[in-house]
Amino acid sequence: MFDLGACHVERDGDGNYRVSWRTARPGQRVAIYMADNPDHYYTGKELGTPLLYSTGHDALLLNPDKDVRHYFYLETERGEAVILAERQLSLQGTHNFRDLGGYEAEDGRRLKWGKLYRSSKLSGLTDVDRGYVRRLGLTLICDFRQVLEQELEPTLLHAENMPLLASLPIMPGSSASFLENLHKGIIAVDDAAGFMEEINRDFVISQMPRYAEMFQLLLAGDQQLLIHCASGKDRTGFGAALILDVLGVGEDAIVQDYLLTNRYLPIEKEIQRLSSEFSDHTGAAVSAEVLRPMLEVRPEYIRACFEEIRRRYESKDHFYESALSLDEDKVKRLKDRYLH
């Protein structure tokens, strides 16, 4: 058996892949395969010839085409296997673009790689980025930004094979006065961490129709989905948590995925930028102590969502059906489509 928590794919400075793994029996020979389409592994097609065999716990693999995303199939000599890919995609013009694949569901199946993505805004994609994203085969993009945000920083992708762009604006009621001050160049929050928890609770209280619409769009066909907002942190963080939860991923794993935002966003740079551009209600520069809880994610933020769900609904099934319009059959369809 592979230890999923110790199996990773990352790129080095030259764009090559460092694949690492751990098995229950160290020293086993592991065969490593690479393909540019994950369906190659999910449909039971012939694997072909391994790139290499290893009895170690990691390997450096040359990247044959840096403009294409690659997926890896690792198989032990006992026939145990795992499919891996980079969690974060290597893009220059946007942060926090990552794949939800690989997580284990309660029934023992795992989320397919290359099907469900989350990111920050796409307005800064370079030409190379746009070509890379086009090759992902996305069919549906759900944008949780406000309409004004979408208009000021529109999503720009190649016209070829353009995915459906669904505008699903999310605006938690607790942030209305905050945004009003923000337009005046003021960031005024007494308890920043408490404010973020309140925003997350309000996702459950007031914003569920938009997230329900996301699931209905997801059910409309064999979708390859990207969800995003401005930074891919709060609105997208809750959307990703809902997707993982409906597919049967445990809450602890969902929290760990949520916390990856702290790794993939340039939080310190944003603190410096906002501190120079905004003031507090006294006219002074906004301190890092105020900004940091607003720019990073914390376990208590996303757990506040789950607490609110448990407080308002009798069970998970009640929540899925009442808030997300997902009955047992629809949940099963989603699991059959996105788990393997």
Image (spheres, rainbow, N blue to C red):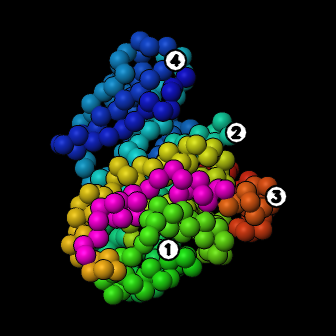
Q: Distance between the Cα atoms at labels 4 and 1? A: 42 Å
Q: Amino acid at mark 1?
A: Phe
Counting every numbered tag in the picture gives 4
Residue 198 as seen in the image, left or right of residue 92: right
The disc label shown at residue 24, or none: 4
For the question of whether residue 14 can be seen, the reply is yes
Instruction: Determine whether the residue tagged by mark 4 lies in a helix, strand or loop.
Output: loop
Q: Which residue is mark 3?
A: 314
Residue 137 drawn at (x, y percent):
44, 61
For the residue carrying disc 2, how many other residues have a C-alpha within 10 Å: few (<14), some (14-19), or many (20+)?
few
Q: Which residue is mark 2?
A: 107
Q: Amino acid at mark 3?
A: Glu
Residue 201 drawn at (x, y percent):
61, 66
Q: Which badge, 2 or 1, comes first in the chain's sequence?
A: 2
Q: Which residues are magenta?
A: 284-307
Is most of the magenta stretch helix, strand or loop? helix
Q: Is residue 213 above or below residue 89?
A: below
Q: Which residue is mark 1?
A: 144
Which quadrant of the rendered structure holds the N terminus?
top right
